[in-house]
Image (tube, rainbow, N blue to C red):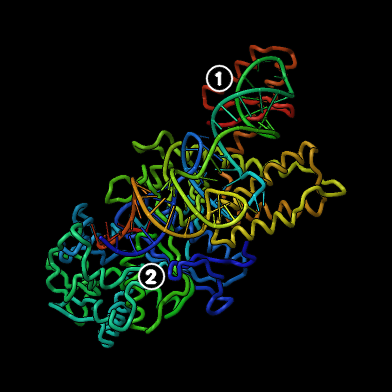
Amino acid sequence: MPSSLHLHNTLTHKSEKFEPLNPPFVGMYLCGPTVYGDPHLGHGRGALTMDILFRYLNHLDYQVRYVRNVTDVGHLLNDADEGEDKIGKKAKLENIEPMEVVQRYTNSYHDALKSLNIIPPSIEPRASGHIIEQIEMIQEIMNNGFAYEKNGSVYFDVIKYAETHDYGELSGRKIEDLIAGAGENRRSLEGQSEKKNSNDFALWKKASPEHIMKWNSPWSKGFPGWHIECSAMSEKYLGKEFDIHAGGMDLLFPHHESEIAQSKACNHTNPAKYWLHNNMITVNGQKMAKSLDNGILIKELFSGNHRLLDQAYSPMTLRFFLLQAHYRSTLDFSNEALKAAEKGFQRLMSGVKNLEGISPSPNSEININDWCEKLYAQLNDDLSTPQVIATLFEAVKWFNELNSNRLKISKEDLETLEKTFKLFVFEILGFVSEKNNHDQILDGIMSLVFDIRNSAKQNKDWDTADKIRNQLKDLGIEIMDGKDGSSFKID
RNA sequence: GGUCGGAUGGCCGAGUGGCUAGGCAGAGGUCUGCAAAACCUUUUACACCGGUUCGAAUCCGGUUCCGACCUCCA
C-alpha cells in the first residue's frame, strides 16, 4: 500500500508516484462536455473522478489549478457533414441562437454537478472564446511542417508526424495498422478527398455558407477542429507542460492521442505528465451514450422519470454509487445496484449521527492510527474509493459497538476517529447530508407527535398510538419504536 | 482485422500467491404492546482447460465469452 499518492498513468500503463512538475503547484485538465444536450450519468463520472482528485490534492496542501473546458464549437458531427458542427445543428433544429443552446446546456451541466456536490474548476474556458489561441497554434504546427492547407481547411499530417514521432504512444496503436485501415468494418467516409491520408484530422475547417458559427482565419472563414481546442486552452492556462490530463476512456483515441501530437508538433513536448482515464458506465453491458439512445440523464435519475428507472434516486445516492466502483472499471447501471447504494449511503450517514453519542473511556481497544493510515493508503492507491468506503464502514460498525459499550475508546482516539471519519466522508469523498430546512421543521413537528403518542402508549391506548402510526405511514412517514424512544423515516 | 480492457457468491462491486473486502438482498437472533427500523451473527465465490508452486481465484500458457476504441462520444 503506497504511503504517497500514486496514479495509474495511461501513457505508461503503470501506477506511478505522483510528483508534480513544479510543487507545490499542480495543473490539471479535464476534457469537459460538448454542450449540445443535458448531461447523463457518464458525464457525472468523469467530473466526479476529478473532483475526488481535486479535493485530495487540496487536502494535501497542493496549490491546484483545475481547468475544465466547455466545448461549444467545432465538433464535427462527422466528416460527411462537411462543416456543420453539433452546436449549429442543434440550434437550427430548435430555431434559436447557437449561444443559447450553449448557455442552456452549460447551465444544465452546472446544475447537475452542483447537486452532486462537485466543486467547480478553477477555470472553465470555452472553446469559442479561444479561437485566436487555436489559430496561433495551428499556424505554428504548419510552420513546423506538420500540417497542410487544402481548400481553406487545415489538416494535421499524421504520416509526416509519424516519421519522427510515435503517433500511438498513448493508445498503443501502430501507425501501420492505422494506415491499413480498420478492416471491413471501417466505414468509407465522404469528404475525405481533401486529406492526404484518412487518419489526418482537421485543425481548421472551412465553413459552408449555411454554417452559423464561424470565424475569420488566415485560411478561410471557418471553425477549429475538435482536438485543437483542448491543446490551446490547456497550454494557455496550464503551460506547455502540466501535471494531469484526464478524460473518459473513449477520448483516448483519437482525441488525446491527437492532443499529444499537436503539442509535440507545436511545442515539442507532451502536454501532460500523467494521463488519467475513467471508464464507462454501462447499461446491460453496453456503454451509456447519446448515440446509442440508452443514456440516463442525471436529472432523470433524480426525478425517476425514465423507462429504466424503478424510482427516483437522490444525488448522494448517485455519488455513493459511482464512488463504490473504481474509476477505471466499467460500472453497470441497474436499479438493484442503485437501491443498494441508497441503503449504503444511509448507513454511512447514520454513522455520522451515531458518532455524536459516544462517550470516551480511559483506554482504547481500537488501533486508530492503523485505521487512519489505511484510509490514506487506499486513497493513495490510484484513488481507490471503493476500499476507502469499505474502511469507513469498519468505523460505522465501531460506532455502534462503542455506543453499546461493547468497545472502548480513549478521548484522544475518539477525537482522531471523529476528525478523520468526517474528513474522509465530507471533505474528500464529498458527501453531504441530504437534510434541509424543511426537515428541521418536520423534526419539530414529529417530536410533538411522538409526545402525544407516547402519552397514549403509557395509557395503553393502542388505538390512538396505532392510528398515528398508520396514518403517518399513509403519508409516507414511517415510525419506528426503539429502546431509546421513537424515530421516523420518510420513504 | 488492429489496439486496449474485462470475466468474482442472489445483485453491485473491491482485492489478492496462504489471513473477513464492503454495501444490498437472504437466514437466525437481540430489542419490542404489536410492527417496522436499528443492532448482532451468518450461508453462498473467484469463466474453462493445462502448467509453475508446499499452496493459485491470484503467476504463466491456451480456450471460450463480453466490452471499449479504430466515426461524434465522459
Chain letter belonging to callout 2: A
Looking at the image, can residue A355 be seen? yes
What is the crowding at mark 2: few (fewer than 14 residues within 10 Å), some, or many (at least 20)?
A: many
Count of numbered badges drawn on the protein: 2
Q: Which mark is residue A226?
A: none
Q: Is residue B10 above or below residue B49?
A: above
Please give the name of the residue rendered at 63% of the width and 34% of the height, measured from the top-left corner.
Answer: A443
In the rendered structure, the answer to whether residue A314 lies left or right of residue A281 reads: right
Q: Mark 1 highlights which residue?
A: A471
For the N terminus of chain A, the quadrant is bottom right
> Mark 2 vs mark 1: which is more N-terminal?
2
Front residue of A100 and A302: A302
Chain letter belonging to callout 1: A
Q: Is residue A92 above or below residue B45?
A: below
Front residue of A245 and A456: A245
Please give the name of the residue rendered at 66% of the width and 43% of the height, measured from the top-left corner.
Answer: A351
Q: Quadrant of residue B41?
A: top right
What amino acid does circle 2 point to?
Answer: Leu
Residue A421 drawn at (x, y percent): 67, 52
What is the crowding at mark 1: few (fewer than 14 residues within 10 Å), some, or many (at least 20)?
A: few
Looking at the image, can residue A123 be seen? no
Secondary structure beneath dot 2 equals loop
What amino acid does circle 1 point to?
Answer: Gln
Q: Quadrant of residue A176?
A: bottom left
Q: Mark 2 highlights which residue?
A: A170
